[in-house]
Amino acid sequence: MIILAIETSCDDTCISIIKSKNKGIKFEILSNVISSQVKLHAKYGGVYPSLAKREHQKNLPIALKKAEKIAGVLRFDLIAVTAGPGLEPCLWTGVNFAKELADKLKLPIIPVNHIEAHMLANWLLPINKNPKNIFPAICLVVSGGHTCLILMRNIGKYKLIGETRDDAAGECFDKAARVLGLGYPGGPVIAEQARRWKSKIPSPDGQIRLPRPMINQKNYDFSFSGLKTAILYDFQNHSSSTRNAQKYIREMCFETQQAIIDVLIKKTIKAAKDFNAKTVILGGGVTANNELRKQFKSQIKNSKLKIQFLVPPKIFCTDNAAMVGVAAFFRQQRNKSLKILQAITVNANLKI
Ligand code: KG4
Ligand code: ZN
């Protein structure tokens, strides 16, 4: 089955063409086009929805042509599109584009939940897909809009066990970068500054100590707005010469990143223990973070739990349409009666 997938929930215009093989045991990515709007939104320090919508409208036909050319195919069996959660005007642009295309090509459309797509990005990996080896799994989805822990009993069988009560982890990276004057998106720049601080000073024991919100609470929820405020207060409490110095910026980035990592890892491993998980699955833009990936791997190893650890290659952690195609494939497999869904609508607050 060849799937044409569309993703426009935030600021990346993505089109991918994937081919499923052996009932989803393997997926071949024929093309994966990502047209980033980062430079445009950087001026505003975050995504500006009406601007993002206009860019999606402009970029979608170009991305489609490019994806078809790279893949070398023009015939598809299915169209997949993200229907939520995300920025409503952006979601509508993708869904309307999918509808027009489906009309023209006489194809069914499968609407996809963006959070499920981030989880299923791991099915693009050449792993053993036998459900007995994977489930139950604990999934951590961390991006600019979401921070959630999900108990996964099978593909399609999800239970949200915890989520952020305020800001998402990616949002915290982005807002910290804004305070520090580092630009948008915050995650990659904070990671880079943090790496430099650590490598320049032999001992990474600095002066700045940020809170690890809710780290010892028994639930699986998160909260990052207090961390963001702590960063702002620390910044404001220093003279402009101190806070603009390289040392302060690098140390603050290191501590911000580590505070977020500590909370995410502790809560995820706790959930994995409590639910006897066989696998920990990561997804979402924040999981592209090198330190997070490295520390997760080593802490799972140190926990002596027999847990498989899955994280997608970085290009499939941040928004992409290949993961949307995978989610649509499994949705179609679960419900063969999902045929022509021209009446699909979007839901900016869609839950898992
Ligand atoms: O999944 P994604 O591309 O879009 C949403 O669904 O929101 O995630 C974007 C988020 C941004 O907040 C960005 O700062 C963060 O992922 N991010 C990172 C890294 N790369 C992207 N955060 C930490 N470290 C990174 N290397
Ligand atoms: Zn995302």
Image (tube, rainbow, N blue to C red):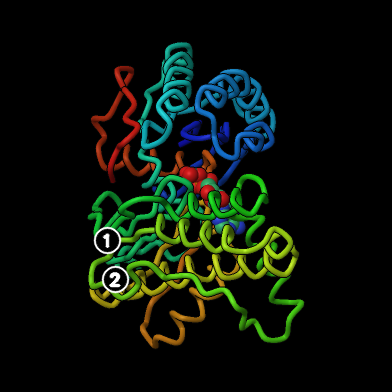
- For label 2, the crowd category at 10 Å Cα-Cα, with few meaning under 14, some 14 to 19 and many 20 or more, is many
What kind of element bears circle 1? strand
Dot 2: element: helix
Going by the numbered disc 2, the residue's amino acid type is: Ala
Image x and y of residue 175, in percent:
53, 50
The residue lying at 43 percent from left, 66 percent from top is 128
Q: Could you tell me which residue is drawn at 50 percent across and 76 percent down?
A: 297
| 236 to 50, vertically: above or below | below
Residue that badge 1 annotates: 151
- Mark yes or no: residue 181 visible: yes
Q: Classify residue 140 by image quadrant.
A: bottom left
Say which of marks 1 and 2 sits in front.
Answer: 2
Give, as a three-letter code, the residue at label 1.
Leu
- Counting residues from the start of the chain, the first of labels 1 and 2 encountered is 1
Q: Are marks 1 and 2 in contact (CB under 8 Å)?
A: yes
Q: Which mark is residue 286?
A: none
Horizontal side, residue 182 vs residue 95: left or right = right
Give the percent coordinates (x, y) of residue 341: 31, 22
Above or below, 73 relative to 29: above
Image quarter where the N terminus lies is top left
Q: Nearer the viewer, residue 136 or 75?
A: 136
Task: Give the camera-side residue of 130 and 81.
Answer: 81
Picture coordinates of residue 65 (x, y %)? Answer: 65, 23
Please tell me which residue lies in front, 17 or 309: 309
x and y percentages locating residue 349 in the rendered image: 31, 36
- Residue on which disc 2 sits: 271
Residue 122 appears in the picture as rendered: no
Residue at figure coordinates x 32%, y 59% from the top left: 149
| Residue drawn at 56 percent across, 54 percent down | 176
